[in-house]
Amino acid sequence: MRVLLAGVIAFGAMHPAAALVAPDAKRGEEIYGRCTACHSLSFDRVGPRHCGLFGRRAGSVAGFDYSTAMKNSKITWNDKTLDQFIAKPLAVVPGTSMTYDGVCDARDRSDLIAYLKRVNKSTECRK
Amino acid sequence: MSSFLQIPNPIAARRMFLGQSGLLLSGAAVALLAGKQALAAKTDGGTTNDVQILNTALGAELEAIAAYQLGAESKLLQKPVLDLAVTFQGHHKEHADVLAKTIEKLGGKPVVAKAKYNFPVEQLKSQADVLKFAAKLEQGAVSAYLSAVPLFGNRDLSKAAASILGDEAMHWAVLRQALGEVPVPSAFVS
């Protein structure tokens, strides 16, 4: 059973279609459900807001209590840095308070980032 | 023990269902706290990470407690949904309590509830809106605990987190059911 499960997970992580399929923001919206224990789009919660994310310096939302590690990370959020971070948050920013193992599937990350980009242009993020 | 699925009366079934989930949580709490001495004795580098993981979880639990309080006081929830919300809030209070105590035993400082939380109050206009809001929080909690399980240095904490995960997943399923959605949408959670 363990071997079978490992195989399923490995297939999901390494599926070659991930690199060929165009990012699907609608699917990314569903994946965003994984983030909703701590994050919202337009207001800060356990994690900082996601509106205004692209081009923002990590650790820079005014009034949010970031970890020292995140404040000192010198990351600016874009497609590439987001993809790297959400794949393995603690490996990219050791000491981050985002104690989340990561989104291991490349297609899931791509779709999630597509959703975040789309929603950042929405009225909810333009308020 | 008989299954809540075998009980034709939905209210009685729910009572049994909630009772069983309560037993599960109590088991986790006992297991977590029973290992406190061994946990406290550990001084390796993993303990610092474990405290951070527990504190992030505690922050989310405290927010969930506040969110359910908002729902309970909104006057938008009718019985038996209101009872359900209060019961689930009670579970989150138990989670928060055990997390805070464990953090202290590990030598850490538990985060405390914020004086004020930002919730989308203007978007909550019906019982369904409140249930959807709660369901989103529970779905996120399932994912957060799932993703914390492999990170703990101490496997007893992984086990306790998995137990809380199970409770949150049941909350999510019940809320989906109450919304008329498929209660368990897939074979795996992520």
Image: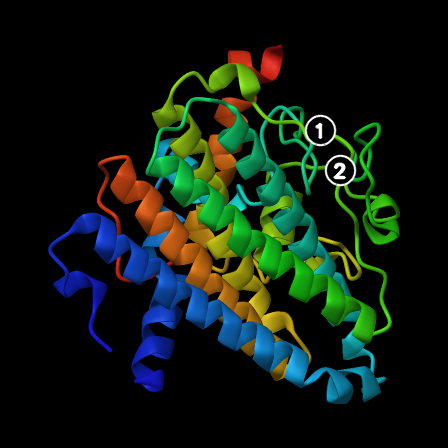
Q: Is residue A38 visible?
A: no
Whole-angstrom CA distance, mark 1 to mark 2, is 6 Å
Q: Report the front residue among A77 and A31.
A: A31
Color encoding of the figure: rainbow
| Residue under the image location 61 percent in, 82 percent down | B156
Q: Report the front residue among B136 and A98.
A: B136
Number of labels in the image equals 2
* Image coordinates for residue A19, horizontal then vertical, percent: 40, 51
Chain hosting mark 1: A
Is A115 placed left or right of B66 in the picture? left
* Image coordinates for residue B18, horizontal then vertical, percent: 36, 58
Q: Amino acid at mark 1?
A: Gly
Q: Amino acid at mark 2?
A: Thr
Asked if disc 1 and disc 2 are in contact, CB closer than 8 Å, the reply is: yes
Q: Report the front residue among B182 and A3.
A: B182
| Label 2: element kind | loop
Report the quarter where the N terminus of chain A lies.
bottom left
Q: Mark on residue A76?
A: 2
Q: Earlier in the sequence, mark 1 or mark 2?
A: 1
Report the quarter where the C terminus of chain A lies.
top right
Q: Mark on residue B177?
A: none
Is A23 placed left or right of A57 in the picture? left
In the rendered image, the vertical position of residue B40 relative to residue A115, given as above or below: below
Chain hosting mark 2: A
| Residue under the image location 69 percent in, 49 percent down | B59
Q: Which residue is mark 1?
A: A55
- Disc 2 crowd, CA 10 A, few/some/many (<14, 14-19, 20+): some
* Image coordinates for residue B20, horizontal then vertical, percent: 36, 67
| Label 1: element kind | loop
Is B71 placed left or right of B107 in the picture? left
Is A126 placed left or right of B48 in the picture? left
In the rendered image, the vertical position of residue B154 relative to residue A104, given as above or below: below
